[in-house]
Image (cartoon, rainbow, N blue to C red):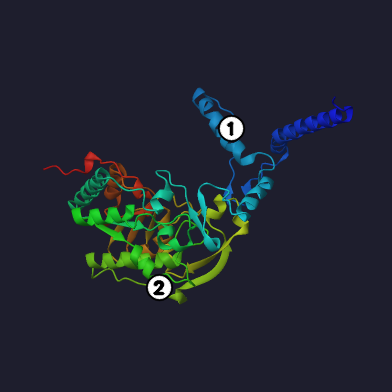
Amino acid sequence: MTDFNDYKISKFNAVLFVLIFLLAIYLPLAGSIMQTSSIRASTEKRILATIPAAPDSYKLLKRYPEKFDIYYKDNFGFRSDLLWYNKIKYLVGNSPSDKVILGKDGWLFFNGEPFTDLQNTIRGIRKLTETELEQYAEVLVARHHWLQAQGIKYLLIIAPNKHTIYREYLPNSLFQVDEETLTDQFFDYIQRHTDVSVLDLRQVLLSQKASETNLYFKTDTHWNHLGANIAQNEIANILNTYYPEQITPILYNDKDFQIKTGPGGDLSRLLGLNKNFTDIYHNPILDPCSKRAVPKDGNFSVPFTTRCGKTELNALVFRDSFFEHLYQYISLYFNRATFVSKRIEYASLNKYINNDRPDIVIEEWAERYLVSVPEIEPEFKLKN
């Protein structure tokens, strides 16, 4: 027979559970209503989405739910207060984001590949097929010869992944299964089957890294300015073979950098723990012309042009985020350099060539994007 007191306790627990459940559901909504529309996320260093305007057409109405969803994800009540949970997960060795791998000694590694399983790529399991390698060769040769026919040189640069240079800081679980990686396949095939200039920066960065001086940020996806300095010197060495009378490679030394400690990088922001991390920044002291024409808001996704007048040469650069630490150095080698944040495609390349008349087209890809083989565009095929 059920004791009356036990029944009261059971009922009390049930009511308490329901109240907690309702509180969990409606507290964020209440917070959203009460909070101001203030709205820079201190942990993520970005402007939060604002509430979308009321739709005044059927087309805008169809897109309104998507826009409101983005707004609500950024602004639900007590959002920033709930990020403490991320810190607890990190402290027990569990990454708060599936896009970040927690490495040794506070190192963070990017795991946000949109095209493949990064962990299998790291371990040498993911490979390029023979068909993919053949397509790579066809695409790059077509671009190279199309530009060559117009008197323009082409150089492709592959920026190594952080885990390629600092593999020793990966978790022990990410051991290498096959010594030959997808990247090894790519360089070997392109060098044996094409006449395209492709710069492999892995060995020079591996040979010059030192335990006391990192070439990549511990808390960011990218190389720092010390790594970029080594990379730009290698790029300039190739440019020197093309234009020996006009390009003189410069490798900057310690006195050319100002060292400071700053907040954590993009990977710490993905964890929601930017305030809990710091990193070391080596800011270069360069000719001021390298900073001209850069968007004042720092939005590198917008094409921009630098004019340094160092030579008579003009460059057109298609690049990704790794070049944000390279453009200042590279611009100093040219009269004019235009930087475009995308991969090459025929329409944009043809437009910029007609406008800028470059002497060389440089394309840079992060190593992780080698899994995404470019499509073959028939416009690049030369007519006989």
The image quadrant where one finds the C terminus is top left
State whether residue 280 is above or below residue 344: below
Q: Nearer the viewer, residue 294 or 149?
A: 149
Residue 366 in which image quadrant: bottom left
One can see residue 263 in this view: yes
**Residue occupying image coordinates x 47% and y 54%:** 295
Residue 53 numbered mark, or none: 1
The furthest residue to the right:
4
Quarter assignment of residue 293: bottom left
Q: Tell me if mark 2 has few (under 14), some (14-19) or many (20+) residues whose alpha carbon lies within 10 angstroms of its own.
A: some
Is residue 93 or residue 5 the one in the foreground? Answer: 5
Q: Nearer the viewer, mark 2 or mark 1?
A: 2
Q: Are marks 2 and 1 in contact (CB under 8 Å)?
A: no
How far apart in space, not on screen, are marks 2 and 1 (Cα)?
50 Å
Q: Which residue is mark 2?
A: 252
Q: Residue furthest left?
A: 384
Q: Is residue 359 visible to us here?
A: no
Residue 230 percent across, percent down from the top left = 38, 68
Tell me the residue at 87%/28% (across/down): 3
Residue type pointed to by label 2: Tyr
Task: Report the side of 75 relative to 223 (left or right).
Answer: right
In percent of the image, x 20 and y 56: which residue is there? 192
Q: Nearer the viewer, residue 170 or 59?
A: 170
Counting other residues with Cα less than 10 Å from the Cα at mark 1, is it few (<14), some (14-19), or many (20 or more)? few
Residue located at (42% from left, 46% from top): 117
Kind of residue sitting beneath label 1: Ala
